[in-house]
Image: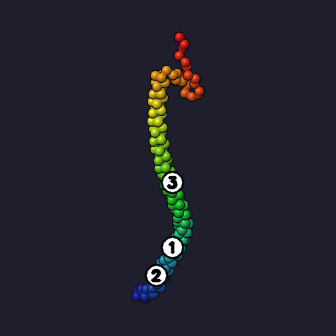
Amino acid sequence: MLTDVLIQIAIGIVPLGVAYLAFRSATDANRKTHQTALLQVERQAELERSKVDAEAFLRAKTIYEDALSQLEKQLARMQGQAAQVGADLATEQDASTSMRDQIRRLQAQIRALERTVLTLRAQLLAAGLAPAPSSETTGPYQRRHPPAE
C-alpha cells in the first residue's frame, strides 16, 4: 500500500516534472526569442542610423569639399593679386627713385643757374650796368645811366 501510494505519487510527479520542464523551456525559449527580436530591432535601428549618418557624412563631405575648392580658388586669386601688387610696388619704387634722381639733377641745375646769375650780376655791376632787381626774376629791364655831373 505504501508502495502503491509512492508509485502513484511518483507517477503523478513525473508528468508535473515534465510539465514544469516544458514550461521552463518554453519560458527560456520565449525570453531568448524576445531578446533576439530586441537585438534585431536594435541592429536594424543601428543600421538605419548608420545609413542616415553615412548620408549626412556624404552631404557634409560634399559641402566641405565645395568650400575647400572655393577657398583654394580664392587663395589663388589672392596670390595673383599679391604678385600684381608686388610688381606694381616695384614699378612705383623704380619710378620714385627715377623722380628723386631727376629732382636732384634739377636742384643741382638750379644751384648752378643761381651761381651763374650771381656771376652775371657781378659782371654787370663791374661793367657799370644795372642788373634786374634781385626780387624780380623776369621781364625787360632798362639800363640805368650814371647821373650826369
Counting from the top left corner in percent of width and height, residue 17 is at 45, 82
Q: Amino acid at mark 1?
A: Arg
Residue beneath disc 3: 84
Residue located at (47% from left, 81% from top) = 25
Q: Amino acid at mark 3?
A: Gln
Q: Tell me which label, 3 or 2, sits earlier in the chain.
A: 2
Instruction: Answer above or below: position of 123 versus 12.
Output: above
Which quadrant is home to the N terminus? bottom left
Q: Earlier in the sequence, mark 2 or mark 1?
A: 2
Q: Give 19 or 54, whichever is nearer the viewer.
A: 54
Q: Nearer the viewer, residue 94 or 32?
A: 94
In the picture of the structure, the residue carrying the numbered disc 1 is: 43
**Percent coordinates x, y for residue 103 in the rendering:** 48, 39
Please name the residue shown 54% across and 68% down the image.
Answer: 58
Q: Residue 147: which quarter of the image?
A: top right
**Which dot marks residue 21?**
2
Farthest residue to the right: give it.
140
Q: Nearer the viewer, residue 64 or 93?
A: 93
What whole-number distance in Å separates the C-alpha atoms at marks 3 and 1? 60 Å
- Pair 3/1: label in front: 3
Relative to 74, say whether 144 is above or below.
Answer: above
Label 3, secondary structure: give it: helix
Q: Is residue 99 visible?
A: yes
Q: Amino acid at mark 2?
A: Leu
Q: Nearer the viewer, mark 2 or mark 1?
A: 1
Above or below for 27 versus 147: below
The total number of labels drawn is: 3
Q: How is the image coloured?
A: rainbow
The quadrant in which residue 14 appears is bottom left
